[in-house]
Image (cartoon, rainbow, N blue to C red):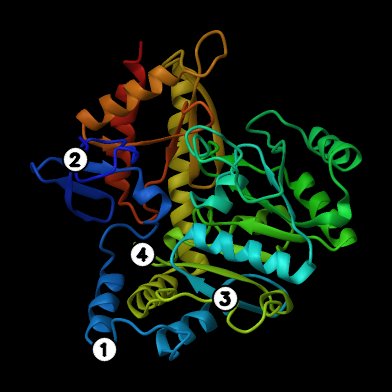
Amino acid sequence: MNPESISHSISIVHPITLSHGLNAEVWDTDGNRYIDFVGGIGVLNLGHCNPAVVEAICTQATRLIHSAFNAAPHAPYLQLMERLSQFVPLSYPIAGMLTNSGAEAAENALKVARGATGKRAVIAFDGGFHGRTLATLNLNGKVAPYKQRVGDLPGPVYHLPYPSADNGVSCAEGLKALERLFSVELAVEDVAAFIIEPVQGEGGFLALDPTFAQALRRFCDSHGIVLIVDEIQSGFGRTGQRFAFSRLGIEPDLLLLAKSIAGGMPLGAVVGRRELLSALPKGGLGGTYSGNPIACAAALASLAQMSDDNLATWGERQEQALLARYSRWQAAGLSPFIGRLTGVGAMRGIELINPDGSPATAQLSALLDAARAQGLLLMPSGKARHIVRLLAPLTIEGKVLEEGLDILERCLAALR
């Protein structure tokens, strides 16, 4: 499925056409029902057509659809930034700006870091994903398909191994690679920023080693380097807390937000230290559609539901269901292709590996097709596309969650 009017460079995971959805269920134009474990790739933590979000969108659409904030500020933008300053658990006073997407948030964070430090080099991590724009492409720790055929990319950008128990890279190995980088390739005084995900999304739901995160924070402090934490996919309750950086015992200088910030409306943000966000001259930040009033209203309605109690309850319920199933599958020897369970909280991935230890990419592709045929939508991840990432809405009903896991179980057992 790829009509001639749509670029063939857009890859389609599931060749269906959706017509409507509600919470964790969607229907296609042929009337087929699916349980959605994709969630718009982490956008729908509160589900499809969340009633409070829908009401906020409809109400705002009758009041003000658009005003370019740079030209004439509007109330929803001001209200949302005030709410975010309260919602993001940082110990210092914060400021920020709204964007249209996560990639745009990352782009603006790079501008801020360069403007504040007067330096250019940025260090990212293997397996990371920060967007598809030219600057963010260079940050991504993966070539195919994102960097192919696009030529030279904005830089300079360097990459380090991503230390995680989920990929077998230790904190010591990460620190050794860091030491080598600054002794062989790069002067530390030239570095503007590090950018890192506390849990990699596209990389396969790999959770960052807390000891490495704390060492990196100390390193940045000692050398005047900006630490950018990308919570575009891991934020807003996906790991059971507001943001995953809290699990690591660190605070970022700049925090990237998007995806589940606005219940499905296109919106992102960069928030962080006020002195950094004010480093560029007037007019250095902004955008015509950035912080659209309807998207801001949707975000305010989303945040109103994301109390710590709700996030903890939703995250724990989903996490416990996934852990119980995985343990049962392992104990029963459900499939020789089931590898590790990656990630934390409700942000989990199931690794598929061949008996020789190599990535079972073909089996994952077959799993996606088989699950869809039985009414379950799944999403691939990992460098070799061999890790199933599970992104069901946090608000999924228990019965629907179990139904989806039943389908996944049958399809895993049938892999050959």
Q: Amino acid at mark 4?
A: Gly
Q: Earlier in the sequence, mark 3 or mark 4?
A: 4
The x and y percentages for residue 153 are 60, 46
Of labels 3 and 1, the one closer to you: 3
Marks 3 & 2, CB-CB < 8 Å contact: no
| Mark 3 → mark 4, Cα distance in angstroms | 25 Å
Between label 3 and label 4, give the one nearer the viewer. Answer: 3
Q: Is residue 55 above or below residue 123?
A: below
| Label 1 Cα neighbours within 10 Å, binned few <14 / some 14-19 / many ≥20 | few
Mark closest to the chain's N terminus, 1 or 4: 1
**Amino acid on which the number 1 mark rests in the picture:** Arg
Q: Amino acid at mark 3?
A: Leu
Disc 3 target residue? 285
Q: Secondary structure at mark 3?
A: loop
Residue 63 is marked as 1
Badge 3 or badge 2: first in the primary sequence: 2
Query: Could you classify mark 2 by the number of other residues whose Cα lies within 10 Å: few (under 14), some (14-19), or many (20 or more)?
Result: few
Whether residue 232 is situated above or below residue 275 in the rendered picture: above
The answer for how far apart the CA atoms under marks 4 and 2 are is: 31 Å
